[in-house]
């Protein structure tokens, strides 16, 4: 028997006191909300906070889970990795606590945007998840999906767990 392999990642949709959303401009993917892979030995929350700090320079408080997503499509790797396995991503709503916006090698730009503007700028890979965040009052969304070569999301399972 072979055990399944998944990358675990987390994303943070961060609101400030003016109800604006933080986006970082990834050199390869364009505007997105911060997040990334959880490293071995990290909790999901600690990994999310680390990724946000690395990409934006700020500290956050994690408030709610809003979505759990399983990208079931394996894809060709890069930098010596042959295949990238399926990815489980957990999205959270976060609140800005402190720190100054700072760019890094993972971000060409970091800015606060009004919700509508952020929705227009965010890259196609995160559009589906971002829309779910804005509708989070319905509950926690758990979805299985694949992204095709055009970054279109094909949802093959979606469940909303009511609050």
Image (spheres, rainbow, N blue to C red):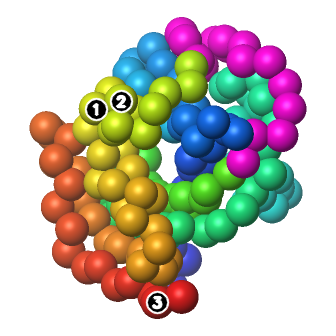
Crowding at dot 1, Cα within 10 Å, few <14 / some 14-19 / many 20+, comes out as: few
Image quarter of residue 54: top right
- Pointer 1 residue: 120
- The image's mark for residue 162 is 3
Number of numbered discs visible in the structure rendering: 3
Marks 2 & 1, CB-CB < 8 Å contact: yes
Left-right relation of 67 to 43: left
SS class, disc 1:
helix
Separation of residues labelled 3 and 2 (CA atoms): 28 Å
Marks 3 & 2, CB-CB < 8 Å contact: no
Q: Is residue 8 visible?
A: no
**N-terminal of the two: label 3 or label 2?**
2
155 above or below 12? below
Q: Nearer the viewer, residue 6 or 44?
A: 44
- Verify whether residue 99 appears in magenta: yes
Q: Residue at x 58, y 18 (%)?
A: 110
Q: Position of residue 62 (x, y in %)?
A: 75, 57
Q: Position of residue 74 (x, y in %)?
A: 33, 54
Separation of residues labelled 1 and 3 (CA atoms): 28 Å
- Pointer 2 residue: 117
């Amino acid at each position: 028997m072979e055990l399944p392999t998944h990358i675990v990642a987390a994303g943070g949709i961060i609101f400030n006191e003016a109800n604006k959303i933080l986006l970082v401009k990834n050199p390869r993917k364009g505007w997105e909300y911060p997040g990334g892979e959880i490293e071995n030995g990290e909790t999901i929350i600690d990994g999310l906070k680390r990724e946000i700090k690395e990409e934006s320079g700020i500290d956050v408080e994690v408030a709610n889970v809003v979505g759990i997503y399983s990208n079931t499509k394996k894809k060709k790797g890069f930098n010596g990795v042959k295949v990238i396995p399926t990815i489980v991503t957990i999205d959270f709503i976060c609140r800005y606590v402190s720190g100054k916006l700072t760019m890094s090698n993972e971000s060409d730009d970091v800015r606060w945007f009004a919700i509508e503007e952020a929705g227009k700028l965010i890259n196609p890979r995160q559009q589906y998840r971002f829309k779910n965040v804005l509708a989070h009052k319905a509950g926690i969304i758990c979805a299985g999906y694949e992204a095709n070569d055009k970054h279109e999301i094909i949802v093959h399972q979606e469940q909303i767990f009511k609050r």
